Amino acid sequence: MVLTGKINWIEGVIVTLGTLLTSIGSSVAADIPPAKSIVTPAPALEAWTFTLAPYVWMPSLDGSSTVKGRTTDVDVSFVDILDHTKIPKDLFGVMAYFEARNGRASLFADLLYLKVGLNGDMTRSRGVDAVNASVGASAGLKIEMVIAEVAAAYEIAKWGSTGAPGSGAAIDLYGGVRGWWQKADASLNLGGTVNVGDLTFNPDRTLTASGSVSWLDPLVGVRLRQQFAPGMDLVISGDVGGFGAGSKFSWQALAAFNYKLFVRNNITWSGMIGYKALHVDYSEGSGLTRYEYNMTMHGPILGLTARF
């Protein structure tokens, strides 16, 4: 009897302790936050964005062009070119800009075809040692060119809104190449004796010197992208190139302002207005084989930008 009572007492103690431990464990478990999952989601991939901007460039020309030893000086505004040329026979151009961006990196291309015909009222001819300078005034100059620029850019700095919501700015560094193909025809009035060389006589008593060249320039530049508000942004860029690899030296400067017009089919359409200047100093050959293009082309640009 005594043994049975002790056993019952021990069992009661064990049951009591079990109940107490169970209560304490439940309370502690309730206070412990659930463990975080050890599986972390993969980072979201940056989305590609694309920009396509066909545009019109209206350049003035300031410099000189030398074809087969004969140099023609040019200093003419785009308004004068419009007044003295026939469109599209003597004035025609096709231009477009394309950019693909992913996060901080981007690739862009700028393609341009331009044909400009200048009459003798807009040019002045001068000779070189290898060509007799007694030829009369220039009868005109026709220039046809293709310029293709391809570059890669990387965002090195960015800062957020300091005013209007959605504003901010970023700076890109970029590098690439600019390829040129160019053909020039210089017409000269016959006003006296001339060392003809390989110039071509025309029925109207003029001489024509023709030549074409192509070259490739490396380039490096910097670009500022400033967004004033959603749908309003400004791009300012500048680069230098050539360095004797193709041309002696070249530089380009651009400022373009975009204003959102409308959105359709997930494509944002914006109007673009700006100013572009491009200078190049290229030469090859000597004497009657001399070809040189030392020119600054500058003027307003108008275009339509599509972002998607």
Image (cartoon, rainbow, N blue to C red):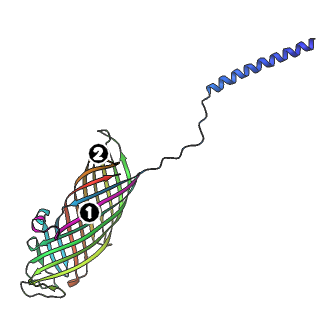
Give the image quarter of residue 194.
bottom left
Circle 2 Cα neighbour tier, 10 Å, few/some/many (<14 / 14–19 / ≥20): some
Whether residue 90 appears in magenta in the rendering, the answer is: yes
Amino acid type of the residue tagged 2 in the rendering: Gly
> For numbered disc 1, what is the local secondary structure?
strand
Q: Which residues are magenta?
A: 82-102
Residue 88, percent across and down? Answer: 17, 68
Query: Within 10 Å of the Cα at label 1, are there few (<14), some (14-19), or many (20+) other Cα atoms?
Result: some
Which residue is more in the foreground, 96 or 122?
Answer: 96
Residue at image position (17%, 85%) is 199
Q: Is residue 98 magenta?
A: yes
Which residue is drawn at the image coordinates 25% and 57% (left, top)? 254
Q: Extreme front residue here?
A: 265
Name the residue: 36% across, 54% down: 50
Q: Which residue is mark 2?
A: 231
| Residue 297 to residue 229: above or below | below
Q: What amino acid type is highlighted by mark number 1?
A: Met
Q: In the image shown, does 269 or 284 lie closer to the viewer?
A: 269
Q: Residue furthest top?
A: 1
- Asked if residue 48 is positioned above or below residue 181 in the image, the reply reads above
Side of 132 relative to 16 (left or right): left
Label tally: 2
> In terms of sequence position, does the residue under pointer 1 or pointer 2 come before the other?
1
Tell me residue 231's x, y (percent).
29, 45
Secondary element under disc 2, as helix, strand or loop, is loop
Percent across and percent down for residue 135 are 9, 83
* Image quarter of the N terminus: top right
Horizontal and vertical percent position of residue 60: 16, 64
Quick check: 255 left or right of 18?
Answer: left
The numbered disc on residue 95 is 1
